[in-house]
Image (spheres, rainbow, N blue to C red):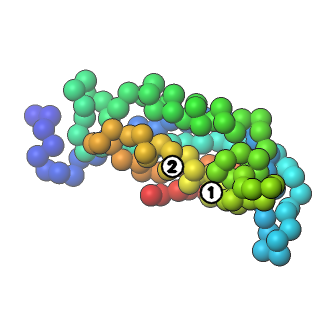
Amino acid sequence: MFDNDWGWLMYQIQIEKNFSASHAIALPDGSLEPLHGHNWPVVVTVQSQELDEIQTVMDFHVLEGWVDELISKVHNRHLNEVKPFAGEQGKLAVNPTAERVAWWFGCEIASRLPQHVTLVSVSVGEADGCTAVYLP
């Protein structure tokens, strides 16, 4: 009755959080845009074709803890000064665009997931109606 014999069933869970941070994106001419801040909504979605021994994709609290840990590294900070965005001598290693913030969250979360769970997406909002999505 509950078996996934068809191979097409999929279960997903999401964690939604917010953080505040500033950034200044490097522009094509090498200059930085003016320093400014955002309230960044983050949505992390993971999935599995099978449920674990207690019939969940994974523990919501574990996933939430990982997202909270990442947020603690950037909340109320200037992204240009936080790894992986910060480089040597004040230069950027990774341009702190919304796309790259989503990528960073995604790579960090994906590396921690149980074997049967995969990252579906991470979306990061920069302003109302402006959202970047990372799809691994």
**Label 1, residues with CA under 10 Å away: few <14, some 14-19, many ≥20:** some
Q: Quadrant of the N terminus?
A: top left
Q: Is residue 130 visible?
A: no
Point out residue 29 in the picture as x, y percentages from the top left corner. 83, 75
Expressed as whole percent of the image width and height from the top left, the position of residue 90 reads 81, 55
Q: Nearer the viewer, residue 113 or 50?
A: 113
- Label 1 belongs to which residue? 100
In the image: residue 50, left or right of residue 112: left
Residue 32 vs residue 37, the one in the foreground: 32
> In the drawing, does residue 30 fall left or right of residue 53?
right
Residue 55 picture quarter: top left
| Image location of residue 135, percent across then percent down | 47, 58
Dot 2 falls on a residue whose secondary structure is helix
Local secondary structure at mark 1: helix
| Residue at 77 percent of width and 35 percent of height | 76
> The disc labelled 1 sits on which kind of residue?
Arg
